[in-house]
Amino acid sequence: MSIIHRTTMAPTKLELLTPWLPAQPWYRGSGDEPVLSRTGGFRLDDPQGEVGIEFMVTTDESGGRPVSYHIPLTYRAAPLEGAEEGLIGTSEHGVLGKRWIYDGTHDPVLVAELLALLQGRAEPQAQSVSDTPDPSVTARFDGVPLATGVVSATVTSGPDDTRVTVDTTGSPSAGRLTIQVTRVLEPGGTGPADAAGHVTAGWHSPDGGEARAVFAALSNTGI
């Protein structure tokens, strides 16, 4: 169950993302410091109840036009061994204490639950309300053999997305899958044509307009 605490974080998520975002290969900024606002997203539950999982949309208005980025995040009570490359920073949570905040594509808990969502085995939760499903987040699954767990994952980022290649357990034919995480959101974006599954969600522009696009897509890359 996603429990949302009405409290403070110091520094805030956006304050942590402001210096981190320009260092990413998919950042479209002009060189000025990002001017960020939170403009959408949703959450997933960790079955063990230990890791916070959020899929945040943040919009940067520092350039000639607003650009919206999709940033999966995890929140942990201790450092995640081997995930130093994915660490965004630490923050003091008003209820939970010190939290280590990661780019979730480097966190096996988020990767496993995103895979479950792509395959229809997890229910998206509202970003800011406890224990409340978000029916606006939709998943389509066209039958890549069902994988029920993640053995290992390799993360690579390009100019538009991050690809997480995962070796899975479950169906013997599931094998190796690739999750393509959209980073730069374009209204109406549909993801790769050959995807066997995808997750679509919405966000709003700074002027209040609504948009939807594919946030993540799934393909089978072999056994």
Image (spheres, grey):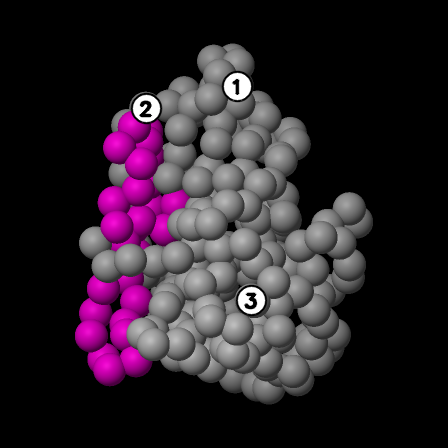
Mark 2–mark 1 distance (CA, rounded to whole Å) = 13 Å
Residue 130 visible in the shown view: no
What secondary structure is found at the residue carrying circle 3? helix
Q: Is residue 195 visible?
A: yes
Quarter of image, res 64: bottom left
Q: Which residue is mark 1?
A: 175
Judge from the rendering whether residue 123 lies leftward or rightward of residue 154; answer left or right: left
Which circle marks residue 148 in the picture? none
Number of on-image labels:
3
The image position of residue 215, as x and y in percent, is 36, 51
Where residue 209 sits, quadrant-wise, is: bottom left
Q: Is residue 40 magenta?
A: no
Q: Residue furthest front?
A: 30
Q: Which residue is mark 3?
A: 21
Q: Is residue 209 magenta-colored?
A: yes
Pick the residue in front: 151 or 6.
151
Which callout, 3 or 2, points to the residue nearer the camera? Answer: 3
Q: Residue at x 46, y 69 (%)?
A: 29
Which residue bears the numbered disc 2? 143
Residue pictured at 43% horizontal, 70% vertical: 58
> In the rendering, at what x and y percent does residue 11 appear?
65, 82
Q: Which secondary structure, mark 2?
A: loop
Q: Is residue 175 above or below residue 56?
A: above
In the rendering, at what x and y percent does residue 129 appear?
40, 73
Mark 1 Cα-neighbour bin, 10 Å: few <14, some 14–19, many ≥20: some
Tell which circle, 2 or 1, labels the residue nearer the N-terminal end. 2
Distance between the alpha carbons at the discs numbered 3 and 2: 35 Å
